[in-house]
Image: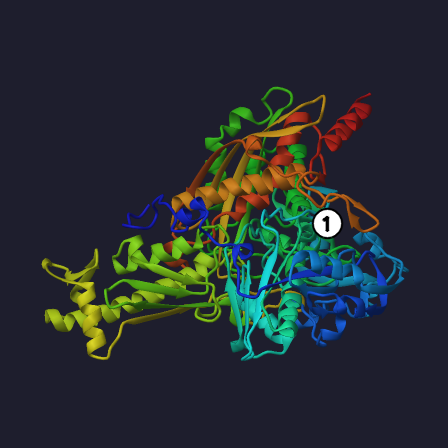
Amino acid sequence: MKDYKILGKSVARIDTPLKATGDALFTADIKLPRMLVGKVLHSPHAHAIIKNIDISKAEKLPGVRAVVTREDSFDVRWGVFKYTQDHQLIAVDKVRFVGEEVAAVAAEDEETAIKALDLIEVEYEILPAVFEADEAMADGAPLIHEDHPNNVNIHVNIDVGDVEKGFADSDYVREDRFSSSGETYGMLEPYTVIADYKAAGALEIFVPTASPHTKAKALSNLLKIPLNKVIVRRSNVGGALGGRSDIFPLDFITATLSRKAKRPVKASYTREESMTCTRQVHDMIVDVKTGVSKTGEILAQDIKVIMGGGGYSSTGPIAASVPFLVWEETYRLPNVRLNSYRVYTNKPIRGMYRCHGRAFLGGLGMQLDMIAHELGIDPVAIRLKNALQAGEFQATGSKIFGCGLSEAIKNAAEKSKWAKKRGKMAPGKGIGMGANGMMCGFPMGIRGGSSAIIKFNEDGYPTILTGVVDNGQGNYHAMVQICAEVLGLNIPDIHLVAADTEVTTLDMGAYSQAAVFVGGNAVKNAAEDARQQIFEIAAKILDCNADELAIEEGKIFRKNDKNSAIGLHKVIRKGLIDNTPVIGRGSYMPEVSRTREWVSNPKGQQAGTFSFGANVVEVDVDMDTGEVSVTKATGFHDCGFPINLKAVEGQYEGSIASGGLGSSLMEEHLWKNGRMLNPDFLEYKMPLAVDMPEISANVVITDDPKGPFGAKEAGLFGSMNSFQAIGNAVFDATGVWVKEFPITPDKVLKALAEKEKTVK
């Protein structure tokens, strides 16, 4: 590994002291003068026409300052793309799920606001509802949006090569069905918004968000306010996992309440509201047919996916595509067909997720092991045979640049002692592997890029201005590390201002796994620009050429003469006096196909680069109760070059918690007639510290040619392949395949009972 002064080390993050001491401000901690309390009235019905709303009694209640209903909604709809804009952020004609926002109030205190909600009278005409995606697709099912036949919101079709010929040429063909229920994001922070609509016509909004500039643009459209008048202040985020990337009704509602009341308004969702009314995770049914040669080479694959999307589109086209994209980023697929259907249902809205696609990626990764088992091939060997290499192209046309996938697979197998354990452990104990790639920076138009500014104060210390967002990954620290390395400074010397749309430059936020890759490149370019300006000013002082200079510890000197050093602050002051202030500017846009589109043309370069990883887990299955415990996890991640080793290790540990223990073994929604039965942390089971296994986090260094200092995405590989690793380990421990996620004790016992019947 290259030896840098700042990069590649395990160092404490710049945000650690604030969070450790409790000084970090979350939205709920912020108080503004004369601030009102906002509360929302939700639909009690899964599907109903709104015939009338009477707010007269609520408006007359002493202490109520504003009431918002559909009458305050402009005819503007939200959706991540123009062709998916189907959601007015307060219900207008009808409600499409239990919990949809129907009205809201702002009052002097919470008690008054709650009383006012009780005084709002809504007349509904109840309609037939449909809750499961496959049932919603059936002929004759109630239409949730009348302009979408069979309730199909999005259909992504990808067809590469000659799939039928591939099956004909195959020596072994297998078909399986996998499924998964919906789940929640499990963020500890209940969703809270503060809106302050100024008399001058500007909206200031404090909100936990992964993409402030995206939210500002959406609110500009929804509220018909110029974009430069929408100021999104991104506060600390108490968990994201993909669930803070979208636009929510509470954003629009709180802003509208403030606009009407002419005072700041804070609206906080309860735990139940947070789990039902922000976003949830798609449930899935995946049918996959795979044909291979006798040596395990994938020759053909036909995949059909049905995803329950809830009442509105949200990030539909992306969600319907990403599980397949992750799969094609991992293995050669010469002949492949995908039909992915995102279907409207009368459940809450589903969005993107850090552990997106557990039935898809878990299922296909498990089927790979099933095929290996039938052909007598080691699961490690079948992955290595099909693994993509640097310089190759994915099925839909993306080129792979740096690639350490095979190395990660081999290293994970070796370190976990795979050869000594697979198929050789005691009954109830097993080991399994998962592997996948991950895109870094996919097409997002003008919001796919990032720009940064580095300004210097007269004492020589710089401030970075960047739109990059940190949801806990360590992105802020990475920006400071990159800047410090380029400018020869120490981490405490640098101040960071980030994710504030009034002062920071455009950036997509913590989305598409691109913060370090895209935002880091922009900061690196800005720092290099600033360094060149510093050298040009210093060259005049030292009477030499700029290319003869170096910078270190806040000193500029000739490379062959450190005694010539002058302080950075002197150079900065000289620039100010000479009217040549040092202001570094940098930007970066990933090199993706500008003609590629999620639905109409899913072909071409779909990301700036790709990361890779392999994950081996060991499980202990109680054969009497069916309970599965993960006892050990070993991961190797090709993150290009680790900016901060400690942060990379932390991301893998988080992946094992969320994708491994949570998504694979515990987390699922329970429903009755469209109403969630477990919208709390008592009945919705998530992993605790006592559930965590022994973890070995490791990196594969490939120095990605596109990334800043060779860096790229770090973290998601562990989330998105733990499903298959755990499912495969359960088979190794028990001899049965559990094809439905999460793999709960009842499903394990059912599979064991079916196996016993078959044997008899």
Q: Residue 514, position in %: x, y?
A: 49, 59
Q: Which residue is disc 1 drawn over?
A: 284
On screen, 277 above or below 664? below
Q: Residue 369, position in %: x, y?
A: 64, 37
On screen, 108 above or below 582? above
- Identify which residue, 3 or 463, lies in the foreground: 463
Q: Is residue 708 visible?
A: yes
- Identify which residue, 522 or 415, lies in the foreground: 522
Residue at 59%, 68% in the rendered image: 596
Q: Residue 578, position in %: x, y?
A: 20, 79
Left or right, 664 with reference to 201: right
* Kind of residue sitting beneath label 1: Met
On screen, 119 above or below 175? below
**Total numbered labels:** 1
- Identify which residue, 434 or 61, lies in the foreground: 61
Quarter of the picture containing the N terminus is top left
Residue at 63%, 49% in the rendered image: 185
Q: Residues within 10 Å of mark 1 (few under 14, many from 20)?
A: many
